[in-house]
Image (cartoon, rainbow, N blue to C red):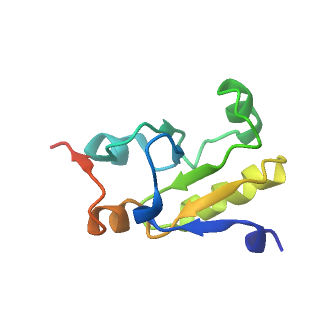
């Protein structure tokens, strides 16, 4: 089962330089985003193969997937895993948990 191959990471364990993919909608990202460098692709429209090629992702580097609470991130992580990218982690609880854990987020009104 693919889900067993996808790890979870607590937002508290993210470090500077970690590769983060935010899969929320552009509207969600425009309102609130993590204050760390991240890539963005909407979970509803992502073409995983094109995404990996576009960003020249190293399949040996860990990719951390973020959404609002974790469900969309897991769905996208499964698709990325199926494309051969094995080092994937879902950020547990998404941006909501990151904010609760004291991870800096940028809130725009």
The C terminus lies in which quarter of the figure? top left
Q: How many marks?
A: 0
Residue sitting at x 26%, y 52%? 104
Residue sitting at x 62%, y 60%? 89
Residue 93, x across and y down, in percent: 44, 70
Residue 19, x across and y down, in percent: 55, 42
Residue 69, x across and y down, in percent: 44, 67
In the displayed structure, does residue 11 sit left or right of residue 42? left
The N terminus lies in which quarter of the figure? bottom right
In this rendering, is residue 60 above or below 56?
below
In this rendering, is residue 72 above or below 44?
below
* Depth order, front residue of 70/61: 61
* Depth order, front residue of 95/15: 15
Residue sitting at x 32%, y 43%? 35
Residue sitting at x 40%, y 64%? 12
In the displayed structure, does residue 87 sit left or right of residue 91? right
* Depth order, front residue of 39/104: 104
């Amino acid at each position: 089962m693919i889900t067993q191959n996808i790890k979870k990471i607590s937002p508290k364990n993210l470090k500077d330089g970690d590769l983060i993919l935010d899969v929320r909608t552009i509207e969600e990202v425009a309102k609130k985003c993590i204050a760390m460098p991240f890539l963005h692709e909407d979970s509803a429209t992502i073409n995983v193969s094109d995404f990996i090629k576009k960003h020249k992702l190293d399949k040996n580097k860990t990719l951390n997937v973020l959404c609002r609470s974790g469900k969309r991130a897991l769905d996208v992580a499964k698709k990325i895993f199926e494309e051969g990218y094995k080092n994937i982690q879902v950020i547990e609880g998404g941006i909501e948990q990151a904010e609760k854990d004291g991870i800096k987020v940028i809130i725009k009104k």
